[in-house]
Amino acid sequence: MALIVQKFGGTSVANIERIKNVARRVAQTYSQGNQVVVILSAMAGVTDDLIKLASQAASEPDRRELDVLLATGEQTTAALLAMMLKDMNYPACSLLGHQAQVVTDCVYGNARILEIGTQRINKLLSKNKIVVVAGFQGQDTQGNITTLGRGGSDTSAVAIAAALKADLCEIYTDVDGIYTADPNICNKARKLKTISYDEMLNMASLGAKVLQIRSVSFAKRYNIPVHVRSSFNEEEGTMVVSEDSGMEQLMVSGVTLDKDQARVTLKKVPDQPGIAAKIFTPIAEAGIVVDMIIQNMRPGGKTDLTFTIPRADFKRTMEIERKVAEKIGAEEVLGDDTIAKVSVIGVGMKNHSGVASVMFNALARESINIILISTSEIRISCAIEEKYAELAVRVLHTVFGLDSDICSDT
Amino acid sequence: MALIVQKFGGTSVANIERIKNVARRVAQTYSQGNQVVVILSAMAGVTDDLIKLASQAASEPDRRELDVLLATGEQTTAALLAMMLKDMNYPACSLLGHQAQVVTDCVYGNARILEIGTQRINKLLSKNKIVVVAGFQGQDTQGNITTLGRGGSDTSAVAIAAALKADLCEIYTDVDGIYTADPNICNKARKLKTISYDEMLNMASLGAKVLQIRSVSFAKRYNIPVHVRSSFNEEEGTMVVSEDSGMEQLMVSGVTLDKDQARVTLKKVPDQPGIAAKIFTPIAEAGIVVDMIIQNMRPGGKTDLTFTIPRADFKRTMEIERKVAEKIGAEEVLGDDTIAKVSVIGVGMKNHSGVASVMFNALARESINIILISTSEIRISCAIEEKYAELAVRVLHTVFGLDSDICSDT
């Protein structure tokens, strides 16, 4: 007997038929002798509809009240699944965030879980109940309803799994696992059997939107094995586990692509102390997040400074930096909102030198110019021209030996 | 400064525009220097839609889970109104049933309020907040969500008004008050300025579906003045108050009609002790509620026994009584599901003899046969043939001096 937490996303509960499918899957796990806690998202589209309703009600919907409104989405699916299971003669009981003792801070719309009291869930489990918890929601210490932000149900699931010391957390979604690359770009991409928490953290933040990044941090901290799999078939998905738990030993586990990128260059910046602060403080104050930065020395005490930002912030950043350039005496500000970031990720590269040179050479062979580079212990990212993005993914996927043997496998 | 509880029904919050109208009205009351607690129903139709959804999910939706589902309706309107008020720069805060400390028993779907803790509402009021409470819902002592049954938001409002010792409870609805009769039947019906709790209790149970009957009992017990009025205009409605608070002194305050009636007659029943139990126990056990009963003696130790029941239970009752008749040796069972009950109600009749004879004579003058009669201290009801129902209402309305002077007033 194991204690299994199963989380079903919005597409898995998009309508009554699909929720019935979820009920059957939950019942099956329970019938195999496991204790089951189910975490649900709202039906696909419902959260967006509620946000739209709120925008009709108020020009700037109050964040506390918006959370009260949004919490109805998961409340609905939790009640429906529990009544279905009972109708199938399985003992089930729904719990809302506050009933499941999910205590958060009071940052409405993006709350963080502070603590999960396990008494109520454990009491129900000890009575052999299937516990159905509304995901995405909690309650602050003052008894106000809070929500955890986009994808928050993943975090609910992993956090509850951690609090209960569950044996496994299954994340059911509309993809059947984590792939070595986006199969839409690279038809030789293949599903990974396992991936480490750290690789997943790097994948998630780079655009593989399968698991909410915060939930992965949680899983890593409490060492909860997470199984990402499809709710539409019975296939095994991808296990997200700690690095040392018998993973495949690949140098690189995946290639990701992020097209939400723009570049800004300040030409001939006087190279003086404090100049970087003058350039970056105004955009930080505007809430714009800088990703990669590169500085090229020129003769005569001047440098060119290039950095990347999300594409949506491109215009604002250009306006800000034009004023900065005037103030600090830089020659001009250039920009480009048609760049992309391609990354290779793998815990294996810690033990293999030469990953970077393999990557750079592979791109060079295709005449793809590298605009910026950034690295972490298990990731190397290159900003390149957007038009080469898909080609770069395919080339890197091949050069790092990730191609599946059977192309039609994807 | 007064403490005013304002309750808005489903048609008053049916869409965003109407909720905005509610927001303006609440803001106006608040701006006049009052403390305001608002109780909301779900948008008209939403509760029915949710029940339909539940019936798709389960053949017999579990009552606990159905309450969790239904509670989303009032949660939605409460959040929307609070965010509108804040958007209009009024300090508002929504509370769900459990947050407003509405403690009920655990009869899901038809829970009774046991207690209302006032700390949280009072704390918000002391901070000059407009408190917006989701009606219809509460929490049992184990922390499960409960709902109060159809029209339960009226009960929420009056109970919260009682707990807070409010000066007034306003019930905003889609009619502009309590009328002396249904204006659709009697075009001389007029709006009452005041009505007593007891009259209202008799009106409500007889089919004037303006106020939930339980809420009126609550208002009576705690002596909360209730103002029933329209949310679509500014006119004064009808005050529901205690009998001695300077009401109009009418002998009869209203004439009501209930067509949901059927009659069953057992002919030539042997007149023996215990025979009534044999007749009525089987239908009580079938959950059928008997309203009026009459027994006519016949020569030779036999009686005819006639009683009324809700029309929906007619067929089942006939089947049951046919078996009973055979067992007890009654001659035959007759029935009629085309009868109606017309009633006159008024606390004034306590001090006036002869109301009954005025009523019976008025009906007799129109050749309307009275099938059964029942009375209470402030009500006389007659079962008559359905085809005379509307005529009977008009005749009684006139004979008891209720007709408005100006017909077009309705």
Image (cartoon, coloured by chain):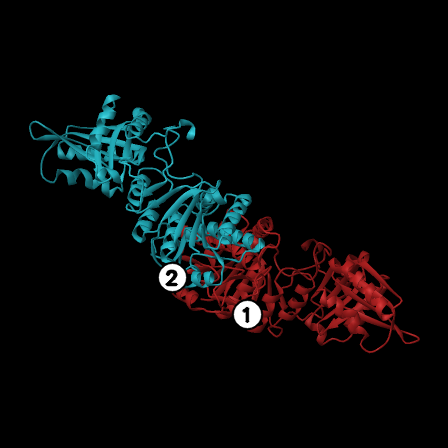
Chain colours: A red, B cyan
Q: Is residue B5 above or below residue B45?
A: below
> Residue A374 at what x, y percent from top left?
76, 70
Where disc 1 sits, the SS reads loop
Asked if marks 2 and 1 touch (Cβ < 8 Å), the reply is: no
- In which quadrant of the rendered image does the C terminus of chain B lie? top left
Q: Which residue is mark 1?
A: A224
Q: Hey, which quadrant is residue A369 in on the image?
A: bottom right
Q: What secondary structure is marked by label 2?
A: loop
Q: Amino acid at mark 2?
A: Gly
| Position above or below: A27 against A280 | above
Tell which of A114 and B130 is nearer to you: B130
Measured as percent of width and height from the top left, residue A376 is found at 72, 73
Mark 1 surroundings within 10 Å by alpha-carbon count, few (fewer than 14), some (14 through 19), many (20 or more): many
Position of A11 relative to B378 (above/below)? below
Residue situated furthest front in the rendering = B246
Amino acid marked by disc 1: Ile
Residue A333, x across and y down, in percent = 85, 63
Q: Name the residue beneath numbered marker 2.
A: B117
Residue projecting furthest to the left: B300
